Image (cartoon, grey):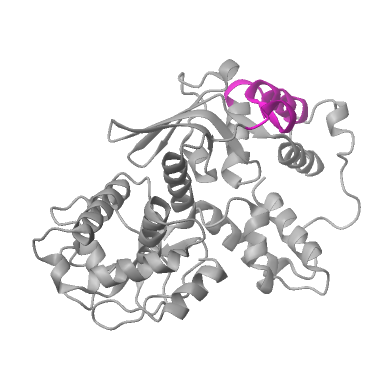
Amino acid sequence: MEAKDEQVVRASALTRVDGTPLPCAVPPGWVPLPVAAAKVLHTVLGQPGQSWGEALAACVAMSNSPDYWSPGEGDAHEIGNWLIRNVAAVCANETLVTGFRPVGGGAPVQHMPADWWDIEQPELRFWTWSIDPDDILSRRLDLPCWILVTEQSLSLQIEKLWRHRWKTPKIRIDVLGDFAPATKALEWIARITAETGAPAIARLAWLGNLGAVPAVAGIVTRAYDGRPVFKERDWPVPAALWAGVEPTDPRNTINSGSFYAISGRSEYLLEGVMWETDPLLAALHNLAALGVAGQAERSPEFSKASPRRGRRKGTGGYAKQDARIVAKIRAMIESSEANSPWDAAGALLDEIPGAGTDDSRRKRVVEAYYAAHS
């Protein structure tokens, strides 16, 4: 949760129904369920200049009110039922990705199965904003774990709701200047690694999965348990999704930049995928510098890529400490807490040893990350 959001929750001094304060400090990349619900409500009903903190107070007051849980009519019931029905639905198909963590912290966030949202009374999740993983239908007031939502999935849903409310079209990306199509990306990979066909697709998916190269799908179609869930244009592809691309799958159509991916119970058809040019070239520079097998003739795009002289990367005085940071970076990318190694390194900056500048220490561990996962 961002620092400014943490301040809003802390300043509100709000509690769940049993008097436990709402969580203010959660692991990077996550937000508490009441904050997610408040931001959804604010996006749909809030007015320009109004703080989402007011929506948070309304959500908590609603969940703490005995009257709300009894049959009734009126705006509060209508809004609350809409919020519960819609938020629970997108959690049940993992459009919003959720997890749980003990009240008070002290343990990592664990993934919350989508089936835990597919219940007859979804309001149980919003009554206390928490859950007991050993008794998922418990109606106790002092449930042991807060429910959290990934920031990435929430931001995508908020953007979609905002565009729907204000009838604002998505700003299209200038793919001609800053992004490269699949055919070009694979051509560059062939020049550096001599890989073509399925191995080249595997290399490209590997770079995407590392978070090294952001990609955007011109159109994404997602199905959950075989049922269509959504279809979006200009969709940023999450790094973790590339792990679900099978390079030999015949549904991958390189000429049109189409890829088929599986993630849990979700299937994705990514059409017209484009890769951000500068990070792609930088990643391929790193591959060349690391001496990837099969390195072919260099083109002008890679003229700056040359093997480093001197001490091999990863053997300096901070090698052991950097290895621990690299492991954390990998974990953050796999859990969608960070979009790239650079972002993850920024979040871990206080843990990176060294007397250099922030950027130099950050760059050092990112280079170590690429070296460890090449």
Position of residue 108 in the picture relative to residue 300 (left or right)? left
Residue 30, percent from left and from top? 46, 62
**Looking at the image, which is closer to me, 213 or 227?**
227
User: Residue, x 55% and y 44% (percent of image)?
Assistant: 239
Most common SS among magenta residues: helix
**Rendering coords of residue 151 (x, y %):** 48, 56
Magenta stretch bounds? 173-198
Left or right of 93? Residue 331 is right
The image position of residue 8, as x and y in percent, is 48, 73
Q: Nearer the viewer, residue 327 or 264?
A: 264
Q: In the rendering, at what x and y percent does residue 122 appear?
A: 19, 56
* Along the viewing direction, whichever of 257 and 153 lies nearer the viewer: 153
Q: Find the residue positioned furthest to the top.
A: 255
Q: Residue at x 79, y 56 (%)?
A: 313
Magenta-colored stretch includes residue 41:
no
The quadrant the C terminus occupies is top right
Query: Residue placed at 85% from the left, 26% from the top?
Result: 299
Residue 181 is inside the magenta segment: yes
Residue 138 showing in the rendered view: no
Picture quadrant where residue 130 is located: bottom left
Relative height, residue 36 to residue 218 (above, below) = below
Q: How many marks?
A: 0
